[in-house]
Image: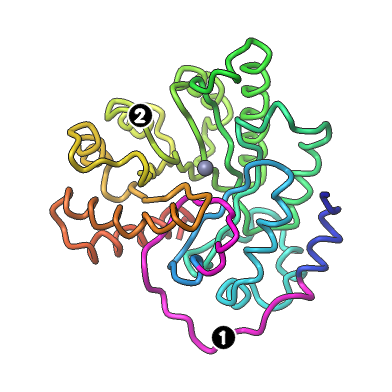
Amino acid sequence: MFEAPSALSSRISSELPSVPSESPLIGPVDAHVHLFPEFSDFAQRRTVSFLNAVSESDWEAVCRAVQCLERNAEALGRNFEQNAELRSGDFKPNAELQVVPFLGIHPWAVLSAEAGWEERLEALLRRMPIAGVGEIGLDAWKPELQSDAAVCRQKTFFQRQLALAVELDRPVSIHCVRAWDHLWELARPILAGKPIPLLFHAFSGSPQIVSQILQKEKWNAFFSIASFRFHPDRPKSRELLHAIPRERLLLETDAESAEDALSLETLCRNAAECLRIPESELSDQILKNVRLFFGR
Ligand SMILES: [Zn+2]
């Protein structure tokens, strides 16, 4: 059951844990992950995790997971209310946060979303200045989402959430599966002259799409390679990894379970090997990219 954002954030602020004396940044970055029962244990071992909501039913749990982590409490300050009062656009997430929340409605969840979602999402985002918008997007692959009505709903949800991200100046985590034509058509007018950071998660496009996004559209985009899609023995995986400019690359698990979340280390190792660079160099580059993603 969803709580009013004001009640939610005041309750969370009273539950913040004590601030740790030091918290070194070590380990890899998971640029796209979902909630699962052992999430906090994993997040403690990661430099940064971008935690994505799927539907309104997990917005509250995402907010709670984000604020209960010690390094987040330190970065946010104990008095979260004070931060929440900052005008939108004045405060950006940064690489010192251990978990960055992304709140939104996934294309797979648009059919079950309840009326009024847009107002509730906007209100919660305004109270969570550190939150990005995600996971949002377009999916032309899942069979039950291909009726005219479902495609129309997907487009409406994507359009409105992207516009909200632009209005509030927030980064966005985007799911786009075989729906690039719809994406160009919908996103172009919204993003024109608005360089908000876009993360194409579990990126499965071609090298041509990478250059279309960066050179033609000139979007401030990052491409996240997912462990379940990256097969170092397949030429297509290797070609795509090499086609992504190094300073635009992120890695992720898209995990919904502890077992899947473990795949990040293997992905880092395989990606570094494929790029013929030491794993530590790749980790450093990715941390730099996270800072770049948040405009720092
Ligand atoms: Zn996801």
At x 63%, y 54%, the residue is: 131
Name the chief secondary structure element in magenta: loop
Instruction: Name the colouring of the figure.
Output: rainbow
| In the image, farthest residue toward the left | 276
Q: Is mark 1 within 8 Å of ligand 1?
A: no
At x 53%, y 89%, the residue is: 21
Q: Circle 1 is placed at which residue position?
A: 20
- SS at badge 2: loop
| Dot 2 crowding, Cα within 10 Å, few <14, some 14–19, many 20+ | some
Nearer to the camera, 151 or 264: 264
Q: Is residue 35 magenta?
A: yes
Q: Which mark is residue 102?
A: none
**Image location (x, y in percent) of residue 165:** 62, 41
**Image location (x, y in percent) of residue 187:** 54, 27
At x 50%, y 71%, the residue is: 44
| In the image, farthest residue toward the top | 148
Kind of residue indicated by mark 2: Gly
At x 41%, y 50%, the residue is: 252
Relative to 241, does residue 152 appear above or below in the rendering?
above
Q: Circle 2 is placed at which residue position?
A: 205
Kind of residue indicated by mark 1: Pro
Nearer to the camera, 140 or 194: 140
Q: Which residues are magenta?
A: 13-41
How many marks overall? 2
